[in-house]
Image (cartoon, helix red, strand yellow):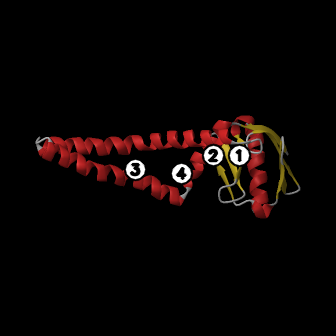
Amino acid sequence: MKIEFEVMENDYINFNIYHLEKSKSRKNTFNLLRFFIPIIFSIPIYFIGTGVFKQPSLYWFIISIIFIAGWILTYPKQYKKLVSKEIKKILREGDNSSILGKKSLNIEDGIITVKGEFSLETISSENIQDIRIYDDMILVYVGGFVAHIIPRRYLDEDNEKNLLESLEKIKHA
């Protein structure tokens, strides 16, 4: 089975976002920033409003609650924007021809070969750690943070089904 595809900048950004969403350590940091930080900052907001501005405490309590709720609701979107911006910046810093670009994936005799414009990688069944399927891509993890990105836009239903069956066979071989 042979599949031709192209990994673009958005595919790589989405891969990183998906990976960060599944990472336990990043989840802890994300939750800390999402929930703990607004609570900490709402306390000075309340005391500055009531102490410095000498306004009613109920008024500043409501403002603090609105601040907390606003932060908690908008933080996931802001986090994704920040991650996306940082990854774009990192991609612009160097040569990414081995990550991005046209690739072909060949599965033959239980061995996966991924060929890029400037790289060739052979993957045996022992190296496949996980296979994750998302709406826009299939990820074949060969390390904790290393995965081959296969955009689903290049696959029709039959190719996708055959690919997933082949990958599962190889993974469990």
Residue position for label 4: 21
Residue bearing the label numbered 1:
149
Question: In the image, residue 128 lies at what x, y percent?
Answer: 74, 59
Q: CA gap, disc 1 to disc 4?
A: 16 Å
Q: Amino acid at mark 2?
A: Phe
Q: Residues within 10 Å of mark 2 (few under 14, many from 20)?
A: many
Disc 2 and disc 1 in contact, CB within 8 angstroms: yes
Q: Secondary structure at mark 2?
A: helix
- Residue 173 in view, yes or no: no
Q: Which residue is mark 3?
A: 34
Q: Who is closer to the viewer here, 59 or 21?
A: 59
Left-right relation of 42 to 73:
left
Tag 2 residue: 15
Whichever of callouts 4 and 2 sits on the residue coming sooner in the sequence is 2
Q: Is residue 6 visible?
A: yes
Percent x, y of residue 1: 85, 45
